[in-house]
Image (cartoon, grey):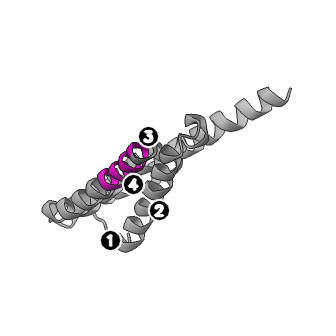
Amino acid sequence: MTSELLGFCNWSTLGVCAALKLPQISALLAARSARGLSLPSLLLELAGFLVFLRYQCYYEYPLLTYLEYPILIAQDVILLLCVFHFSGNVYRAVPYIALFVTSWFLLTLQKWVIDLAMQE
């Protein structure tokens, strides 16, 4: 009984997270404007999700404990690209993407260096 309830909670959380940002994305696309959407708050939310996801990956937690975060990150990236598209400046997204990719790479490299040092 407990494992079924836990499974239901896991999958319902994933379902809710998959649909969490869809109304906001559809409203943004329907309005064809990013007016009223805060870019700094979107970037802060995205950075928080990325840091938490990297933390979970770094310590090799089971995938089901953090599977909703890649879903939320994908939706935030779609929102971010829509904001840049509707503001007329898609190229402004490049530094943000480069920053996130670089941060992810450096955190991965750090784990690799630590693991290599522990083996010696």
Looking at the rendered structure, which numbered label has been put on residue 35? 1
Query: Mark 3: which amino acid?
Result: Gln
The amino acid at mark 4 is Asp
Q: What percent of the width, then of the height, locates residue 89?
A: 15, 65
**Numbered circle sitting on residue 76:** 4
The dot on residue 43 is: none
Q: CA–CA distance between discs 1 and 2?
A: 23 Å
Asked if the magenta segment contains residue 56, the reply would be no
Q: CA distance from mark 3 to mark 1?
A: 52 Å
Q: Which mark is residue 48?
A: 2
Residue range in magenta is 104-116
- Closer to the observer: label 3 or label 4? 3
57 versus 31 height, above or below: above
Q: Is residue 19 left or right of residue 33?
A: right
Locate the N terminus and report the quarter of the image it occupies. Answer: top right
The Cα–Cα distance between marks 2 and 4, rounded to whole angstroms, is 11 Å
Q: Position of residue 43 (x, y in %)?
A: 37, 66
Give SS at disc 2. Answer: helix
User: Crowding near pointer 1: few (<14 within 10 Å), some, many (20+)?
Assistant: few
Q: Quadrant of residue 11?
A: top right
**Residue mark closest to the camera, 2 vs 4:** 2
Does the magenta segment cover residue 112? yes
**Does any portion of residue 26 appear in the rendered image?**
no
> What residue sits right under mark 3 in the picture?
119
Q: Quadrant of residue 99?
A: bottom left
